Amino acid sequence: MDKYIEENKAAWEEAFDNRTASWGADITERIQKDEYPFFNEDTKNILKQIRTEGAVIGQFCCNNGRELLSLVKSGKAQKGIGFDIAENQVAFANEKAEELQLPCVFEAVNIYDIDDRYRDLFDVVIITIGALCWFKDLNRFFAIIAKCMKPGAVIVINEEHPCTHMLAAEGDESFDPEHRMECLYSYFVHEWTGNEGMYYMTQKNYRSKTFTDFTHSMSEIISGMCSNGIVVTGLQEFDYDIGTGFSALDHHGFPLSMIIRGKRLWNEKRLSFEINDDRQLGI
C-alpha cells in the first residue's frame, strides 16, 4: 500500500472514531421515508433516468454507505457493493444495510487493490464528492473502475469542480472573507497535506493524523476516464457548493460543482454503440 494511502486510512479511521453523535444518525429514517435521500436535486434527476431496477451498483469511496443504500432502495437495485479504505466506516455501513434489510455489502479495501473478483460486475457506478482527491494517479484509479464495470455500464460522478482548488476555504491561512472568489492557488498544484482533521464529521478542531490529498484538473479527470475505455456522455457544471467549504459563493457565477456521466465502451478499441441512443446508454 502506498505510504500516503496508509496514512489516509489511519486518519479517516481516527476521524470516524471521533465523529459527532449526529453524524449518520439520520440514515435509517431518511432512507425509509424519503426518495433518493443524500443526493442533490440535479444528481437525483439523473439517477432517476438511469435503469437501476434489478441492477448491480458499485460505489467507490462510499464513506458511511448512505448514498449507496439510498440508491439501492429508491432505485430498486438488485445489489449494491461499496468500497472504502476505512474499516470502521465500512463496518458501520454494513450495520446500516442489515438494519435496513437492503442487499448491500461494503468492503474495506484500498481502491487500487480491488481484484478481479469484481471484473465486469457493475451495471451502474457512482462516485460522489470527496472521492477523486484521495488518489494521486487518476489513470490508475479509473483503470480499476473500468475493470469493474460491465461493457455498456453507466458511471455518474458528482464532485467538486476543479476550479474550487484555486480558492481558499474558511480555515485556510490565506482565507479572506472579503475576497472569497479570489484565486490564490494554482489550478495545477497537485499535492496537499494537513493535520486539521475532518470538521464536517467531528464538528471539532483537533490535530489529526496526516491527510494527503491531490488536486486534479478537468483534463486529468476526463483523460483518466477516456484512456480506460469510459466515454464521457455528459458534463454539467453548477454554481453551487455540494460540500461545506464554499456555500457562501453559491449562485455568484463561480463553478463550484459538476456532474460527469460516462459509459464503458463495449469494445475498448472502437465505439460499437451509438452515443445518442438513449436505450443503449440508459441515461
Image (cartoon, helix red, strand yellow):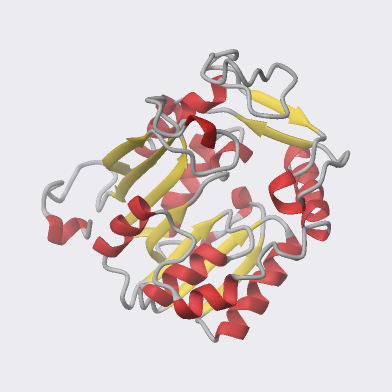
Going by the image, does 234 lie left or right of 110?
left
Left or right of residue 80: residue 98: right
**In this figure, what is the number of numbered marks?**
0
Query: Where 155 falls versus 195 (above or below)?
Result: below
* Residue 103 in view (yes/no): yes
Q: Residue 128's x, y, as percent?
A: 49, 50
Q: Quadrant of the rendered structure where residue 167 is?
A: top right
User: Above or below — where is 196 with respect to 230?
Assistant: above
User: Could you say where residue 178 lies in the image, as x and y percent from the top left?
Assistant: 60, 17
Residue 68 is situated, as x and y percent measured from the top left of the image, at 50, 66
Question: Which image quarter holds the N terminus?
Answer: top right
If the image is split into quadrants, where does the C terminus sit? bottom left
Hey, which residue is sitting farthest right in the picture?
A: 207
Name the image quarter holding residue 251.
top left
136 and 43: which one is in front? 43
Is residue 117 in view? no
Outermost residue on the front side: it is 178
Quarter location, residue 51: bottom left
The image shows residue 87 at horizontal and vertical percentages of 74, 63
Q: Is residue 222 left or right of residue 140?
A: left
Image-based side of 201 in relation to 125, left or right: right
